[in-house]
Image (cartoon, rainbow, N blue to C red):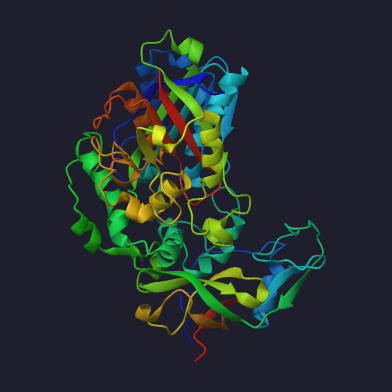
Amino acid sequence: MRDRVCIVGVGETEYRRWGGIPDRSEFQLACEAILAACADAGLAPTELDGFASYANDRNDAPRLAAALGCPELRFSGMVWDGGGGGVCAAVAHAAHAIHSGAADCVAVVRALCQGEYGRFGRVGGRAPARQTPGAGIPAAFAYALPFGLLSPAAMCALIARRHMHEFGTTHRQMGHVAVAARTHANANPRAVMHDRPLTLEEHATARMIADPFRLHDCCLETDGACAVVLVSAERARDLRRRPVHILAAAEGGEGAWGASLYTHAVRGPAYPSANAAPVARRLWAMAECEPPDVDVVQLYENFTGMVLMALEDFGFCARGEGGPFVEDGKLLGPDGTLPLNTAGGNLSEAYVHGLNLVVEGARQMRGESTCQIADAEICLVGGGPGVAPTSALLLRRG
Amino acid sequence: MMPYLPADLPRIAPGRDEAPWWEALARHELVVQRCARCGTWRHPPAPLCAACHATAARFERVSGRGRVFTYTIVHHAVHPLLADRVPYNVVVVELPDAGGVHLISNLIDVPAAELRVGLEVQVGFEDLDDGVTLARFRCPH
């Protein structure tokens, strides 16, 4: 599949703080993002014959195909639970479907409208006290809920605390991730935090959420949707935008990871980690390149500390060195040596469960970012860390 | 005695694989599942051994002695029932005499400033009013 499928269109709705889109349904936002991606690509929406998503997105493929008037639905893909870990896998599934001939034109979409469905980061507020395992409620949650381990922030805080214990990682080092994302958002008019600067000092003293994570270590809760459209590399040549090649894709993680965000049952060197090392090995092998070949990275930041571990897992630095690695300001674009999350990411652009990181990666490869890295040719996109499956993409400028 | 966290937090009813573990807690016994063929410990309970794939297993009583593997102190309540209970701690306890398996729990009667990785802890039991018992840990001294 290497280089054989391209992202040819990207689209998004406006992004607002959660509850900030009171007048449209989440399903409408999903459709609007797909329409925008098709318009960007110069494709009629009726040419779509497949849809992929992840994280149990409510806007299912059959409903999308019907709403958009597609003559035939040939492919629908949903990545098994793992939340934002599945974001790059959803793009990969679309690419595999196109490469195999199962479909010709696939949209990957993610929409969140918390004004309609309730706040993402609030657990059980509307749920019955006794829950049944199922989509979005893994059975393993039984071992976490009674102990107040309810939020991803607290779950990832446990991993980050262990990383601090083993390697001496500091909260201030995590601040470099938050400040880079915010600085990039300040240049991005679409970003929810566009007008809100952030300093390392503000990061260090913000209110505590789940120790060691303070407010600015945590992703946003926002409303909005985004989408990307993929076709074969052959077809991409005839479309209006510079194609963005899927150079490589990989998904999964350690076999023993299971539901470890809920159970913390995984032991050995994988804890603490982002659970991305196995994915990284296959990604670099498929692309036949190495971390120094990458010009810009988009790494899913559910929480800042997890990004330090993702940098280690992907091989930008050795295990345990993620903290010192970022202290020199290399994450700050456009001049840093490893610009990170150049539109602001989940921390400062919007929390579209990381699909906005794929959109930004594509924009970098087209030369259209609001924090454009000069002559960028290869972009790494890493999905949600600390979960299984996690996933990653390498994008290449066409 | 009031439990460390509200008893009516959301819960998931145990499935067939997990029920014996919760039933042992109700008897104030901390047990860990162990493969009857190769002896590998596992937690949470599972229908087969990941090491040898045997389905035969025992729930063995363990001492309840453990070590804090990692922890967090939660300050932001994501459930309305927790609004007046923050800050509270969540710990991952390693059980050295059960192959090092991890349990999620809370540490009772330990000030946040004294919480650290490596702390030696001992299991205790909190009975909730509906017949469910939780394993929560204390410092033995």
Residue for point 69% across, 77% down? B24
Q: As displayed, is residue B19 above or below residue A2?
A: below
Q: As displayed, is residue B135 above or below residue A236?
A: below
Viewed as shown, does residue B11 lie left or right of B109?
right
Q: Quadrant of the N terminus of chain A?
A: top right
Q: Quadrant of the C terminus of chain A?
A: top left
Viewed as shown, does residue A94 lie left or right of B27?
left
Residue for point 68% across, 61% down? B15
Q: Please state the horizontal and vertical placement of residue A6, each as a whole percent of the image.
A: 46, 20
Residue B84 lies in what quarter of the image?
Answer: bottom left
Viewed as shown, does residue B39 lie left or right of A166?
right
Question: Do we see residue B20 in this rendering?
Answer: no
Residue for point 68% across, 82% down? B27
Q: Please state the horizontal and vertical placement of residue A79, each as a whole percent of the image.
A: 56, 38
Q: Please state the horizontal and vertical placement of residue A297, each as a whole percent of the image.
A: 37, 37
Q: As displayed, is residue B16 above or below residue A116?
A: below
Question: Do we see residue A352 in this rendering?
Answer: yes
Marks counted in the figure total 0
Q: As displayed, is residue A252 above or below residue A216?
A: above
Please tell me which residue lies in front, B117 or A214.
B117
Residue for point 31% across, 50% down? A326
Q: Please state the horizontal and vertical placement of residue A161, each as a whole percent of the image.
A: 42, 65
Q: Spot the residue most to the bottom.
A: B141
Viewed as shown, does residue A182 lie left or right of A100?
left
Please tell me which residue lies in front, B54 or A14.
B54
